[in-house]
Amino acid sequence: MHVVFDVGNVLIRWRPERAVAHVYPDRDEALAYLEAVGFAEWNYTQDGGRSFAEGIAALEAAHPGQSGPLSSYVARFGETIAEPISGTWELLDRLKARGHRLFAITNFAAETWPVALQVHPRLGEVFEDVVVSGFEKLLKPEPAIFDCLLKRNGLQAQDCLFIDDSPANVTGAQAVGMAAHLFTTPEALEADLIASALL
């Protein structure tokens, strides 16, 4: 079985509020700002391949005078992903030692993925292939991004286990024929991998 990982909140914690902490040092205020400007939808569009310059212009148009705190998002992005989820990395190493092929599919902006590789170099080393949404202009949970990985690497969906913290993305993987695990904790993932005889 080949194992396909999501990255954010599976292998590394993502805390977007840290990108605006220079303006909103209080975490609750930072989260409230992100909610007020529709950050989740804005970021999803960025992950689909929109440039950061276009994204800030769109944010300013939708929320006049409110884009400033996010204007340095790319420069501050490393602060949002500083923490690895060590338990998941340990499981990844065990899977690799057992001979499973490892891949990743991640919704990530083209301009922030290089930052992730700088902060966590192993992301660029441990996988045979990483499908990054911002480069491909394809997004989870749509079938095309899963098909991209499969076709590019000559894989069959039924031979893959996909691991993601998003229920929608898990459903998307299952829709193309992959087995899937909804990630909550490394401990729960370990139990599922053992039950599936992958570890």
Image (tube, helix red, strand yellow):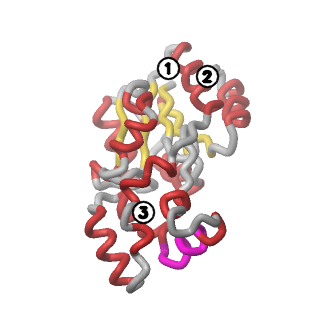
Marks 3 and 1 close (CB-CB < 8 Å): no
Three-letter code, disc 2: Leu
Q: Where is residue 189 in the image (x, y as percent from the top left)?
A: 67, 34
Say which quarter of the image contains residue 90: top right
Q: Where is residue 116 in the image (x, y as percent from the top left)?
A: 41, 42
Residue positioned 62% across, 72% down in the render: 29
Is label 3 in a helix, a strand or a loop? helix
Distance from the alpha carbon under mark 2 to that under mark 3: 32 Å
The magenta-colored residue range is 30-38
Disc 1 marks which residue? Answer: 100
The earlier-in-sequence mark between 1 and 2 is: 1
Disc 2 marks which residue? Answer: 198
Distance from the alpha carbon under mark 3 to that under mark 1: 30 Å
Distance from the alpha carbon under mark 1 to that under mark 2: 8 Å
Q: Which of 38 and 153 is in front in this view?
A: 38
Residue positioned 51% across, 18% down in the render: 96
Is label 1 in a helix, a strand or a loop? loop
Left/right of residue 90 with respect to residue 129 in the rendered view: right
Disc 3 marks which residue? Answer: 44
Three-letter code, disc 3: Tyr
Marks 1 and 2 close (CB-CB < 8 Å): yes
Q: Position of residue 12 (x, y in %)?
A: 54, 41
Marks 2 and 3 close (CB-CB < 8 Å): no
